[in-house]
Image (cartoon, coloured by chain):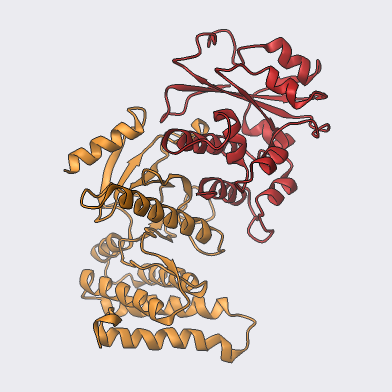
Chain colours: A red, B orange
Amino acid sequence: MLLVLPQFPDYSISINLFTNCNYKGTTQALTSCSVEQAPRAFIKASNIYSTSHLLCAIYKSFIEYKYNRLRTKNLSTEVILSLYSSSNISEAFKQFGVNSDSVDTDNIIVLQIFNNKKSESYDANTNAYGIDNTLLFEILGKNSENLEFNDANLIKIRDISMIKKIYKIKHENSTNNDQIERCIINSIQLRGL
Amino acid sequence: MIDDIIKGVEDYLTPNIPVKLISQGAEALVFETNVHPYNPYTTASNASYIIKYRPAKKYRHPSIDQALTKHRTLTEGRLLSKLSNIPGINVPQLICCDPYNGYIWQAKVGCVLPNGTFSNLKNYLWYQKNIDPFDEDKIVKVLVSVGRQIGILHCNDYVHGDLTSSNILLDNNTSSGTNSANEWSPYLIDFGLSSYSTMPEDKGVDLYVLERAILSTHSLFAEKYNQWLLQGYKQAYCEMSLGKDDKERYTKLEQVLKRFEEVRLRGRKRSMIG
């Protein structure tokens, strides 16, 4: 899926959800399939509650990028930090990132943010996940399947008890789905400021 | 002056997010838009979002101004978040915030009443009084539920700080399907002056400010209205302290009500005397 936030029209965001990944690679392999103009972030999809959850973290990263400063290397990695409920970068990458420890990660979201003005190499017409695709599939495994990033697909793979643990959502106030999403969005938007 | 500020907001939001100014206060401007800041999936045709913007004050030193704006925006955001976790309290949902520039996005609550005004408590009371001043049932229901909201808020030791009848919105949750069309649920808004406080003084002042607001806008029926509000307020206190023994149950409420009487006699500024 390719998306542009209304407030930041200079950037395109590509979000792809992969299932049945057989991830065996190293962190190094992951970084090697990023390009300088548009680094990729690999996110554990089971920890993403809904589309709003991820998009809200992306929005927050843009705000930090434009009006304050990035605390990580680039916009894509900043999204991983924004997702986490504290400002601890290494913890954030452990929980939400895909790395050499995450052997059991079957579902991965690949996120890429393009600056429309700078990345000539990216062609929006060809497909949503532009550059170095062969390498990407090598890392994700041959059986990996590209699903559409939407709520219906996320519901199938999300791990609610893990998400509740990460965001410290207590049982009594998580009676309905809206309330969980609300808690997540609140903590992403207000954390670390 | 105001045109410059609106121009600034439009530049910040880009032409992709058209806004309409709906309210202006001393500290902030409130805009409405139908574009969601980040989730295109939820942009239903009738969805609406509220943007609260605290403009820079030219008379303050820029760095102080920035720090204050950031602090106030964050405080309001945090309160919205804290209150949304308390069962029984209705507050609008926080969508996102940009404390560096003083923007808060919230979900819109409330609707337009049949007489064309917006459904805050003030307009509702006027509207209801004009169609049928003797249909007390509806008004009682609304005012008691409003009182309950404030009661729950105070029970959890939060004070609103600017409790007026236009800062209480009524929403008929017809979309959720649980309420019938005539069922109004009250929402508290504008937490710019709110804080956490255990002091009966602050809660008494909250009640006093609301009483004065009702007195000045609905003077003819104010006495009854305030009675019903207090009735709901007391109900909330009793419900919240279920399980505790009787003595504990009533002391907190009594403290607040006693202080409320005192505030009523002297006005809300305690520090003005002595």
Q: Quadrant of residue B233?
A: bottom left
The residue that appears at 54% across and 29% down in the rendered structure is A75
**Relative to A25, is B251 on the left or the right?**
left
The residue that appears at 54% across and 55% down in the rendered structure is B178
Pick the quarter of the image with the N terminus of chain B: top left
- Residue B12 image point, x, y percent: 33, 34
- Residue A104 image point, x, y percent: 83, 33
The residue that appears at 56% across and 59% down in the rendered structure is B85
**Relative to A75, is B14 on the left or the right?**
left
- Residue A162 image point, x, y percent: 74, 46
**Relative to B40, is B170 on the left or the right?**
left
Q: Look at the image and tell me whether residue A6 can be seen.
A: yes
**Camera-side residue of B214 and B25:** B25
Pick the quarter of the image with the C terminus of chain B: bottom left
**Camera-side residue of B114 and B257:** B257
**Compared to B179, does B14 lie above or below?**
above
The residue that appears at 54% across and 49% down in the rendered structure is A191
The residue most toward the bottom is: B247
- Residue A182 image point, x, y percent: 56, 49
**Compared to A111, does B82 lie above or below?**
below
Q: Look at the image and tell me whether residue B181 can be seen.
A: no
**Compared to B223, does A183 lie above or below?**
above
**Compared to B97, does B259 lie above or below?**
below
Q: Quadrant of residue B246?
A: bottom right
Q: What is the number of callouts on the image?
A: 0
